[in-house]
Each structure stands twice: as structure tokens, then as C-alpha cells.
Amino acid sequence: MLKIILFSVIIFFQVSKEQYHIIHIKGNISSKATGKPYKVGDKLSADDQVKFMTADAAAVLISTQRGRFTIKAQPASTSANSSEMVAFVKNVVLPLKSNGNLSTRGAESADGEIDLKGYLGMSKYAIVGDYHHIKLNTGKYPMNDTKYFIYRYLYEGKTVSKKIGHSGDQLILDYNTLYNVNEKMIPSEKIDKVDIYYGDAKTKNFTLITSFSPLFLKESVLTEELTSQRNFYKSQDYSEIMIKNEVASFVTDVYGKTDKDILLKW
């Protein structure tokens, strides 16, 4: 019986000492004690009270003991007299769902060509910056003035079709081209899904290749998030290889599938 009590005390002591480092924030989350909004790099303890200023506010944390977690507002924490949601960290913290199986590996066919559907996937695909180059086999997909790829998506009930740029054997996904409609940039978050077609303008025959949700990541934001994580993992004596694997898995877990090689070179 004494052993059980001692074990419980040790576990309680360990959890009470656990710290969480904020590595990603969506929306506005503030400290109930100080009223100040949290930012990437700030620390939390299990007994801290946080205010979620909007219903979709959330944060991703690294625990000093147990890996990555997420906190988000719970309906039961909404005040009767306010739209703000207040909760103790320990009551809303949950393990972050891993998407570690998402990678660009397996995106090549038996002959070594990139399979565009396998490469981009069928859901979220994270791109660092405003451009993404994909090398294709021009024997299978010649790209010129008449044969090319196009984006197609719905915006405000209307179908938008746009030619995708290319250079040699490189298909170029470009934020500024994709979201430019009638010489005006539209909010990217309003576009849930983008279809990619390939075909011939002469015959007007275009075939659907894949449908996905591109997510262009701001380099300044990603730099802040990954720098914070790098500093944390270095303080925990992680090797360079371990750090690279951790930050790559962070991107896939939080944002979506990405090209790990391009990410790590960046």
C-alpha cells in the first residue's frame, strides 16, 4: 500500500513540474492571469488558466516529458456572460494526432516517375513560401503552349480555371497565380479544394489528375516556429538528425503532407 502511495506521489510531482512550450498558435489565446496574448516560444504549466478568445483558437505545445500536444477551446468552458472560453491547461490538453505516415515517399511509379496524385495526395499539402517546383517526366507530360496543366476550383459559386506555369520539366505551383482572379488576390482560406487537370488546348481535352488542398506557409511564421523547436530540442540534447525528424513531423502533423527533402533543405 505504501508503494502505491509513493508511486502516486511521484507521478503527481512529475506532472506538476511538467512544462509546455508553445510552438504553434491559431487565433488568439491569452493568459487569464495577465491578460497578455500568448506567442510562439512562451511556456505553460498544467495549472495555468488560458482564455480562448474565439471558438476556433488552438495551440500546439511540446511537453518537456511527453511529446507534442494540442489545446483548444471546449464548449463547456464558455462563460455564460461572455464569448470567451477559459480553462486550465490540464483540462484541455490532448495528444497531437500524428500524420507521420504522410510523406512524398511512395509517390514514384515503378519506372521512377513522380506520380502527381501520390505526391500531392488528396488532402492538405504544405508548401514553404509562394512557389513549389515539381520535376515531371516530359515524355509522359509534355508541357508547352498547347499541352499543360491547369488549376480548377470554385470561388463564390463560379468555376475558376487557370494555367499552371512550367519551366522545362518543372511544374510550378505559384500562390500568386493560383489565387489571382480578375487581377485581384482572393482569400486562399476560402478555397477548400483545388483540382489539377492535364490536357491539350487544341483538342480541349483535359483529364483530372488529382484534387488537393494547397497550403502555402509563410516563411517568417515557419522560421519562428521551427527556430523555437530547434532551441527546445537542443536544450534536451537531441542530435541534428533527431531535430530534423522532429521538425519535419511537426509540419506534417500541424499543416499537412509535404516534401521532406525540400523542407529540410529550406
Image (tube, rainbow, N blue to C red):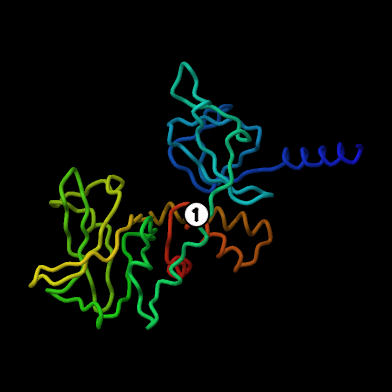
Residue 167: percent from left, percent from top: 24, 75
Report x, y in % for residue 52.
49, 31
Q: Residue most toward the top?
A: 81
Rendering quarter of residue 19: top right
Across the whole image, how many numbered discs are drawn on residues? 1
Residue ID at (60%, 56%): 231
Q: Quadrant of the C terminus?
A: bottom left
**Residue that extends furthest to the right in the rendered view of this protein:** 2
Name the amino acid, label 1: Asp
Q: Quadrant of residue 207?
A: bottom left
Between 55 and 236, the residue placed more toward the observer is 55
Which residue is painted at 24% across and 77% down in the image?
141
Residue 45 pos. (x, y %): 65, 38
Q: Is residue 210 above or below residue 107?
A: above
75 to the left or right of 68: left
Tell me the SS state at disc 1. Answer: helix
Q: Give the answer, above or below, for where 12 lies relative to 222.
A: above
Name the foreground residue: 74 vs 266: 74
Left or right? Give the position of 233 relative to 152. right
- The residue under label 1 is 253
Q: Nearer the viewer, residue 212 or 86?
A: 212
User: Which residue is pictured at 62% across the width and 32% down the height?
Assistant: 48
Q: Left or right: 84 with respect to 235? A: left
Quarter of the figure that contains the N terminus: top right
- Crowding at mark 1 (Cα within 10 Å: few <14, some 14-19, many 20+): some
Q: Is residue 204 above or below residue 72?
A: below
Left or right of 211: which side holds 235? right
Q: Position of residue 81 (x, y in %)?
A: 46, 16
- Outermost residue toward the left in this view: 202
Residue at the image point whose x is 46% and y is 71% from the top: 105
